[in-house]
Image: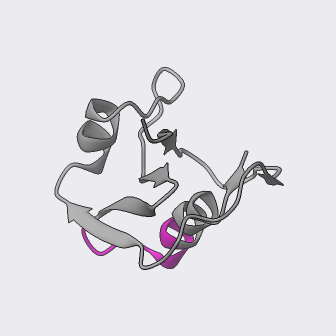
Amino acid sequence: MAALLVSGCAHTDYLWLRTRLPAPQPWFYVSVADVDRTCREIGAQAAVGNRINGCAVWEPTHCTIYLPLNAPSWIIDHEERHCNGEEH
């Protein structure tokens, strides 16, 4: 069974560490109306009271990035780092 990692993200001041190889490209980008709800439904977690701004589902064969509609570049960059094999 493929390894699955869902990362929830709430802020930007992280210490990044490469924990695995990057997922092969192309990566899939999915814009959703309620990214917090969508990410929680697929397993992302955040501290109580924090909203999830995006999440990435890393698998050995690909990566899927869930983003809010009109996502700012910092959220896209953050989730791409997860697809690149980095964690915080």
Q: Quadrant of the N terminus?
A: top left
Q: Is residue 18 above or below residue 7?
A: below
Q: Relative to residue 51, is residue 72 depicted above or below?
A: below
Residue that appears at 24% across and 68% down: 69
* Residue at x 53% of width, y 71% of height: 24
Taking the view exactly as shown, the residue that stands out farthest to the left is 33
Question: Farthest residue in the top direction?
Answer: 48
Seen from the viewer's position, the closer of residues 48 and 55 is: 55
Residue 60, image x, y percentages: 52, 55
Residue range of the region highlighted in magenta in the rendering: 69-76
Q: Quadrant of residue 23?
A: bottom right
Lateral position of residue 57 relative to residue 9, left or right: left
Which of 20 and 29 lies nearest the eye of the viewer?
A: 20
Q: Position of residue 70 (x, y in %)?
A: 29, 75
Looking at the rendering, in which quadrant would you find the C terminus?
top right
Would residue 71 be counted in the magenta stretch?
yes
As displayed, is residue 14 above or below residue 42?
A: below
**Which residue is rendered at x = 55% and y = 68% of the image?**
80
